[in-house]
């Protein structure tokens, strides 16, 4: 069984090794020392960048799927309440059918939120194999020849080799470095998940069983990484920390540009748009000076430098009784033959 999994992951190990060697050759060509641990460490960072660029479309789908699942929870609760307590096959089939129809009509795929993690898991395992056994193998792995493998395995950063782990060393310097990296890895995981939940979800979507499960995972994942991280080589910790930083930055950009309706991120986006338009975007006449400024700017003519505003002719109100002024008179209404104001003139 072990040999089967080893052969199954070998193509990925070969790709990981090839990317590391390619970045190492490029960095060496730029003048970095060939045997330096920093050269190999930056090769791992380059590996992360390539993988995450390839996964960008799936990452965007992940954020949209997570947001969609949270926003659908009120409708999901209605469907579940409709069939609550009904265990007959027809009710179960109807519950499943209406749930899938809700997913279809909203364009939400519940499995899309897991795709980036599922696709990264084999790559993570392949890198673990390369750093944990490949660098100790005299033959190396694919393009990572035995000479390069020994060179990478003996290179150090902050006094620790890329193959060192917390549990397999007595070097205090290595243990301190791995603990710091594990804490940073756990903290970035927590921060990234919290940013997705708190800033990109409306308040109505945070009070349901799905959101409660997400909150549990918010605290569970960092603990899992902290416990399992003591078995990871320094190079793998570097890979995971780098991918967490990339995820946080990429997620910040996506949430900032495409926030969920009703979320804090959407309110922040509206505030930035209002500020960009001089604080007048979205204001009305009831907004005091802001609204008046908008109305005034829409009616006032644009003047050239040195030009005076010309007075406008004001329409004079007509008398309420419909009378007219006498020609040449001083504003007195025309009278009829009997002297009554507004009466018709007698025929000559």
Image (spheres, helix red, strand yellow):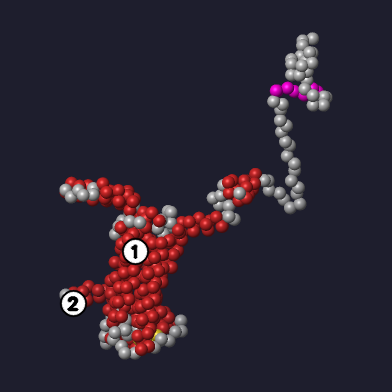
User: Any mark on residue 331, and which?
Assistant: none
In front: 152, or 116?
A: 116
Residue 34 visible, this angle: no
Residue 158 appears in the rendering: yes
Main structural element of the magenta stretch: helix, strand or loop?
loop
Quadrant where the C terminus is found in the figure: top right
Element carrying mark 2: helix
Left or right, residue 265 beside residue 84? right
The CA span between labels 1 and 2 is 39 Å
Q: Position of residue 147 (x, y in %)?
A: 32, 87
Q: Residue furthest top?
A: 348
Q: Secondary structure at mark 1?
A: helix
For this view, does 283 lie left or right of residue 156? Answer: right
Q: Quadrant of the N terminus?
A: bottom left
- Segment colored magenta: 321-327
Instruction: Tell me the residue that label 2 is attached to.
Output: 3
Confirm or deny contact between disc 1 and disc 2 (CB under 8 A).
no
Point out residue 290 in the picture as x, y percentages from the top left corner: 60, 51
Q: Earlier in the sequence, mark 1 or mark 2?
A: 2
Q: Can residue 338 be found in the magenta stretch?
A: no
Q: Residue at x 70, y 23 (%)?
A: 321
- Tell me the residue that label 1 is attached to: 215
What residue is at 43 percent from the left and 56 percent from the top? 263
Local packing at callout 2 (Cα closer than 10 Å; few below 14, some 14-19, many 20+) is: few
């Amino acid at each position: 069984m072990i040999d089967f999994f080893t052969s199954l992951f070998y193509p990925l190990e070969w790709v990981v090794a090839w990317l590391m060697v390619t970045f190492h050759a490029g960095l060496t060509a730029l003048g970095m020392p060939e045997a330096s641990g920093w050269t190999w460490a930056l090769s791992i960072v380059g590996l992360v960048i390539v993988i995450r660029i390839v996964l960008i479309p799936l990452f965007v789908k992940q954020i949209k799927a997570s947001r969609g699942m949270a926003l659908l929870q009120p409708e999901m609760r209605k469907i579940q309440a409709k069939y609550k307590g009904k265990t007959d096959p027809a009710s179960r089939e109807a519950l499943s059918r209406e749930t899938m129809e809700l997913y279809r009509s909203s364009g939400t795929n519940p499995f899309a939120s897991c795709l980036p993690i599922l696709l990264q898991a084999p790559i993570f395992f392949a890198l673990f194999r390369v750093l944990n056994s490949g660098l100790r193998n005299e033959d190396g792995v694919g393009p990572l020849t035995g000479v390069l493998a020994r060179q990478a395995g003996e290179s150090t950063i902050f006094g620790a080799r890329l193959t060192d782990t917390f549990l397999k060393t007595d070097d205090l310097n290595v243990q301190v470095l791995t603990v710091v990296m594990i804490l940073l890895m756990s903290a970035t995981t927590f921060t990234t998940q919290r940013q997705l939940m708190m800033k990109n979800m409306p308040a109505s979507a945070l009070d349901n069983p799905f959101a409660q499960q997400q909150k549990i995972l918010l605290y569970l994942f960092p603990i899992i990484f902290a416990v399992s991280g003591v078995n990871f080589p320094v190079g793998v910790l570097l890979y995971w920390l780098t991918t967490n930083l990339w995820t946080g930055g990429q997620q910040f950009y996506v949430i900032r540009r495409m926030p969920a309706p009703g979320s804090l991120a959407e309110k922040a986006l509206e505030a930035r748009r209002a500020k960009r338009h001089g604080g007048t975007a979205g204001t009305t006449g009831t907004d005091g000076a802001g609204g008046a400024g908008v109305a005034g700017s829409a009616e006032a003519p644009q003047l050239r430098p040195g030009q005076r505003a010309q007075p406008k002719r004001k329409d004079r109100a007509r008398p309420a009784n419909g009378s007219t002024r006498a020609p040449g008179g001083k504003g007195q209404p025309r009278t009829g033959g009997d002297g009554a104001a507004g009466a018709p003139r007698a025929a000559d």
